[in-house]
Image (cartoon, rainbow, N blue to C red):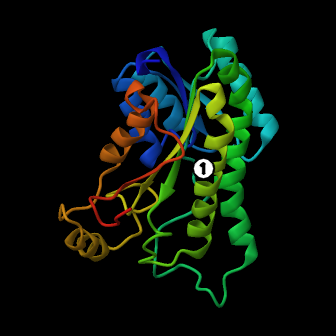
Amino acid sequence: MQLSEQWVLVTGGARGLGQSITRALAREGAGVVINYLHSDTAAWALAEELGPRALALQADVTDAAAVQRLFAQVRERTGQPINAVVNNALAQFRFDGDARPQIGDITWQRFAQQLEGAVKGALNTTQAALPAMREQGFGRIVNVGTNLFQNPVVPYHDYTAAKAALLSFTRTAANDLGQHGITVNMVSGGLLRTTDASSATPEAVFDLIASMTPLRRVTTPQEFADAVLFFLSPWARAVTGQNLIVDCGLVKG
């Protein structure tokens, strides 16, 4: 299915990286569901800017019933099911290495919050999408990961553990759902220059990371978004269970 024929849900799609993914989808003619939790003003403004094939809908992705209602709203308002999901929502996290909790004092509550946002959120959206995807024999799920569990240059313990668990979910879901024509993949970035979540990162850190990459720069949200589009496109129809690292070559494999 071409991108222009799809309705794609982007969780956390109004701000930061999510907004870049939403804009990239709209650029290619896809219908976009801009999910938000608290960013109502940003979501509505973005939907108005992008036109009739963009909807802004509120839902807490950790609430299964709220996610089911969101899917029903999309079907009611567009007459079409959601064909693809980008699990991008981030549970109240900022990339500030100086302020991060260290292993000696971090609480399990912080791990649980990140696991709920990443893994439970992806489970809820996947389960809500499954009936229509199975019926169509087509579906695309893309989870947003990180290169930090391969290269923990800054040990964000809770965030990194949750994204590692999401990679496991990506691979087991891909094996389970491939028989229905549904692919499940992950796109993992490094530090992005710049999103709301990375705005607390000192400029010197961006420059240091850029100096270590083969391209001598830090990935932008727009570049990351284009990689997400690959997995949603017909070009990736035989690709599933994969983790594509988009970080200007910093991490290999």
Provide residue 225's location: percent of width, then percent of height.
38, 41
Provide residue 105's location: percent of width, then percent of height.
67, 88
Residue type marked 1: Arg
The image shows a total of numbered marks equal to: 1
Q: From the viewer's perspective, is 233 left or right of 222?
A: right
> Which residue is found at the position 48% from the left and 26% from the top?
47
> Which residue is found at the position 75% from the left and 71% from the top?
109
Q: Quadrant of residue 188?
A: bottom left
Q: Is residue 40 above or below residue 129?
A: below
What residue is disc 1 on? 171
Q: From the viewer's perspective, is 230 left or right of 158?
A: left
Q: Residue furthest bottom?
A: 104
Q: Quadrant of the C terminus?
A: bottom left
Q: Quadrant of residue 157?
A: bottom right
Provide residue 129's location: percent of width, then percent of height.
68, 29
Q: Nearer the viewer, residue 123 or 104?
A: 123
Dot 1 alpha-carbon crowd within 10 angstroms: few under 14, some 14 to 19, many 20 or more: some
Q: Is residue 187 above or below residue 235?
A: below
Q: Residue furthest top?
A: 79
Q: Is residue 126 above or below residue 100?
A: above
Q: Quadrant of residue 210?
A: bottom left
Q: Nearer the viewer, residue 200 or 163?
A: 163
> Which residue is found at the position 66% from the left and 35% from the top?
177
Q: Nearer the viewer, residue 57 or 64?
A: 64
Q: SS class of the residue under badge 1?
A: helix
Provide residue 216's location: percent of width, then percent of height.
17, 65
> Which residue is found at the position 40% from the left and 34% from the top?
229
Q: Is residue 225 above or below residue 190?
A: above
